[in-house]
Amino acid sequence: MTTVKERIAAITNATKNAPTLSGAAPAATAPAAPVPAQPVDTEPRPGRIDTLIEAQGAFVRCYPVANLIGPGNRPIAAIGIRLNRKREEDAAVVAAHKYAARITADAGDARDAALRDMDLLGDAKVVQALWRACREVVDPNDLSKGIGKHPAFPTDDWMREHLTTDQLAMLMNLYTETRRAAYPERWDLSEERMEALLSMAAKTSDTDIPEVVLAPYAREQVTHAFVYAAERLAEARTSLETLFAEVDARDATIAALRAEVERFQSGSPAASEDERAAEYVDKIRQHHDRLVGASADAPAEAPAGHHDAPGEG
């Protein structure tokens, strides 16, 4: 059976040397200049994987996953993540805007507010980016075989219908892990850097600045910052508890001293006389003890009536 390509070639050969309407043979023509080779279209199409992606250096990683159901209610045991190229990222942004416009078409007076909602547009961008990045794996039991020829999910709308927000967040974390592995960023773990980040977050907590600053960092990097903040908070609480205990002890001492002063100032006269009498008796006893001690240490006196004669040595 003749193919369309073969039929086109036969017609071309038959008419190449055919006589013209005047009966003359066709004039010889100069050979046509070679047509420059057109660049290969590397734009990925749904349902296949462009083999030039890996040749261009795109990074691919495969991950085991759980609690993820694919088309036909089949569990997905592993998934491949391929970093999107700039054209794909741009296409994802455009598709997200189209989705937002489509879903708000019947919103009436609320349409403008819905289109300005960053959560709606941001989630739409995430779904579009993940649909392009998530690929099936060749063998879920051997991830070293890489990704297959098809997307992991049929369409972006299918992902919205069948995946939860938590599942989309899990896939986005895998994409972030893949990007970090492909282009590792230096993460400053110094105390000065951590303190600066915490100070920035505290001063701008009512704005989007903390989210914008931390967005480029990988999950484990943000986790490190969180753990650092938790440690500093625990230390601060311990220091405050110690300080409060010291303040309580000092307040108790001051209260006891004040009570003692008030007791002496507001005590009855009889009680004051008794205290003075007891103090006087105590002083007498102390004086008596000193006298007794002094007499015990003194030399014995000569018998009465005995006197040394004048001149006796």
Image (spheres, grey):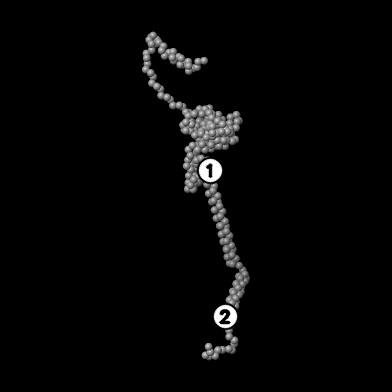
Give x and y (percent) for residue 188: 48, 44
Which kind of residue does numbered mark 1 sit on?
Thr
In front here: 117 or 311? Answer: 311
- Asked if residue 131 shows in the view, the reply is no
Q: Secondary structure at mark 1?
A: helix
Q: Secondary structure at mark 2?
A: loop
In front here: 223 or 163? Answer: 223
Give x and y (percent) for residue 206: 51, 43
- The numbered mark at residue 298 is 2
Which kind of residue does numbered mark 2 sit on?
Ala
Residue at the bottom extreme? Answer: 310
Name the residue located 57 percent from the left edge and 59 percent from the top edge: 249
In front here: 180 or 70? Answer: 180
Q: Earlier in the sequence, mark 2 or mark 1?
A: 1
Give x and y (percent) for residue 244: 56, 55
Left or right: residue 29 compared with residue 267: left
| Residue behind mark 1 | 223
